[in-house]
Image (cartoon, helix red, strand yellow):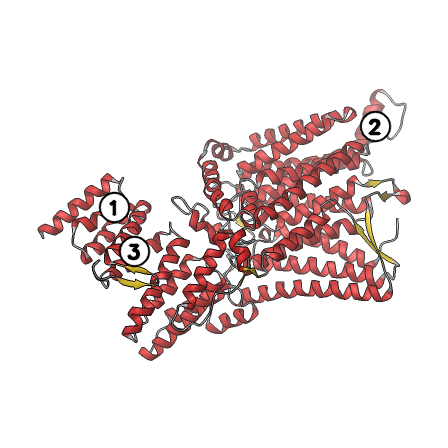
Amino acid sequence: MKPRSRIDNIIFGGILTLLVFAPLAFGSVHVWAYSLIQFGVFVLLGLWAVDRLLLAKAPSVGWVQTPINLLMILLILWIVVQTIPLPSALISVLSPRTFADKATTLITLSNSPDQGSQISPWLSITYSVHPLINELLKIVTYFGMFFLVLNTIQSKRQIDILVYTLILVGAFEAVYAVYQVFAENPKVWWWQSRFGKAQRASGTFIGANHFAAYLNLIVCLAFGFLISQKGKARRMLSGLGGIRATFQRAVSLFAPESAQSKIIVILFLAIVMGVSILMSGSRGGIVSLGLALLMVALLFTTKRKYRKFGLLAIVFCLLIAGYGFQIGIDPTLERFKQTQGLHDRLAITRSILPMMANYPVLGLGLGNFKYLYPRYIVDKDQVSSSGYAHNDWVEAGIELGFIGIALVLAGVIIFLVRSLRLWHRRRNLHALGIGAGVLAGLISISFHSYFDFNMHIPANPLTLAALLAIGYAALHRQGHGYSESFFYRKRTLALTPVKSIILATAILLFISSLLFWTWRHAIAEAACPTEWNSTLNLKWSPELEEIETAISRNAINFEYHHKRALYFMVKNAGDNAEKEAFLAEARRSLEQAVSLNPARGMLWYKLGNIYSYKRKDLVEYLNAWLPQADECYDMAVQCAPMDKHLLFSIGRYWVWRSQLLPEKVMPVQRGTQQVYKQDIIKKFQGLFQRYLELDPDNWHAVFNMVWEAYPQDRIVFGVVPPDNDTLKSRVLKEAAKRELN
């Protein structure tokens, strides 16, 4: 075993720091937290490259060859391809829906009287580049953590230090969770827990489900580590019997040098963590932990001399359940009786499956699901404020397409199969225990992620990446002391002084670009926040200077242009000229925002709203701006067909717009189509029908609006959903009353 360098010690310390920080910082879901993690991992990667290529002055550089190295690189390259403009003809064949949306956007904006843009012969796969780059940086961070842990570990002692650290963090999370359940005013650090007195533990995470997913990883690791310690138990003296033997066992049990004392402590902490998972009320987390430990039990039954550890896994589950019942887990049991949550999750999955059919090969772009999903909502916004699908596997398939999800699935399956094969060949308890714990953790979070978005909580995939590296290293470790070594394969590259400098420069330039993207995103969000952060009092309505600063740092984030438009839209104008100037600025910002993300219905609605107010030149207004507004409103409905606010507001616009159009004998030209008043009446009737299906209690506002423009039974009844007899009766009575008056 070669001596460790000072750089290796720094890297190892950095890894420990990041693994502790990630879960404690609210699961690292906020910009400030995951940006610090990205900075940390990228800097550590740079240190590793400098040490191996420049400082070590070795004739070659080597790194651990795993069965998923190539797949990780290919996945990163595929995500990068999603950002690169490709020939429009190719996009139209492989992803016709993406091509249609982007072509419509370019045509609509180019038809604006003040625009001169043309349809580009090159289009990217992704709808919006900014969220894709943001997610790409996170994925590179997770892969970087896997690489660092695997290529820094050089001994069993280091493996154990990493395991102890993770178990201690998990124990802290569990104790913190117990405090939350029994506290009068539960908090996550300074932030008021969103569960209140609902008796659901979340530790230092925002969500209880994500807390449970994290602890599942640690509990599985702790149980595996328990098994790895069993081989260390030894008697102090031999040949004793009777009372002396009993005394000897007691001393051996609690002696500092005995493994038994460690086993007792780790077992206690593992049980506490298991009970806190029960207290989280996470049904997916509880079932996932049970399945993972069952997998461990089945795994050990395949090895004749180690079947007792399979029984131990069952006993461990019973201990957790027993302590849970003793402490009190009635709220959790009540949640298992409620099946509505599971039905909602499955309904979400069913509603988004058509997205996979529309973007089968190329996907719609990593991080873009939340912008496209509103098109596929069946009856209400089932994803809610999270913006995630509550199913990481399906969401990854939609965003990455068949190519990307095939790489992900191949990586998981290959890692599992290769690790299981190696596990069956090993006899060393340290390798068997930690290996089984890591594999159980992988299975647990893989299953749980089918019902939640655990892999979008950075602390979870970061910890998973470290665990996979720990498990891979433990399974490949052999020998003890000075004879200790790792028998995994390594890829080596011969070096010369010139080659070292060139390679180091290239790697450092790449890492510098990662740091630059991370820095500019963090700085821009600090000036003009657009990502959700419930734990800080962010300034959601920044000043123009702050918005401009954000745009200068990260111009591809469409939300900054949206906020700039909102700033001018609500700004009070002194006269008409100033008002026109403000609207012009808002229009330009909205056009830029729409071009950066054509999938956001609200952007199209606001842009159409501005177009509909361009009344300075009446001829241009009627012949250019209003038809342009019509297109924007149609795009808004197409992007968000179940948005109540948009349906009502756009329906109101079409009621007004229809009154400007002639009867069928005198059509109005709209592009290549003939538009009649009757067509527009049918359009707002359809919109209001959909609106009243979502919000039937607000029928009176719809009735008043339509009756004021068209006091005719035939038109007013057309806004009522056909199968709602109760609402038909109410509208009929109201219409009769109006006619009498």
What is the x, y in percent for residue 50?
A: 79, 62
Binning the other alpha carbons within 10 Å of mark 3 as few (below 14), some (14 to 19) or many (20 upward) gives: many
What is the x, y in percent for residue 679?
A: 27, 55
Distance between the alpha carbons at the discs numbered 3 and 1 = 13 Å
User: What residue did someone put label 2 on?
Assistant: 248
The amino acid sitting under disc 2 is: Gln
In the image, residue 362 sits, relative to residue 275, either above or below, namely below
Residue at image location 65% in from the left, 32% down from the top = 293
Binning the other alpha carbons within 10 Å of mark 2 as few (below 14), some (14 to 19) or many (20 upward) gives: some
What is the x, y in percent for residue 469?
A: 73, 46
Drawn side of residue 54 relative to residue 516, left or right: right
Distance between the alpha carbons at the discs numbered 1 and 2 = 85 Å
Residue at image location 70% in from the left, 62% down from the top = 511
Q: In which quarter of the image is residue 235?
A: top right
Name the one closer to the observer, 21 or 193: 21
Helix, strand or loop at label 2? It is helix
The answer to whether the residue labelled 1 contacts the one labelled 2, judged by CB atoms less than 8 Å apart, is: no
Disc with the residue nearer the chain's start (3 vs 1):
3
Distance between the alpha carbons at the discs numbered 3 and 2 = 85 Å
The amino acid sitting under disc 1 is: Val
Residue at image location 49% in from the left, 66% down from the top = 560
Name the one closer to the observer, 323 or 550: 550
Query: Which label belongs to residue 720?
Result: 1
Disc with the residue nearer the chain's start (1 vs 2):
2
Helix, strand or loop at label 1? It is loop
Helix, strand or loop at label 3? It is helix
User: What residue did someone put label 3 on?
Assistant: 651
Q: Which label sits in the foreground, 1 or 2?
A: 1
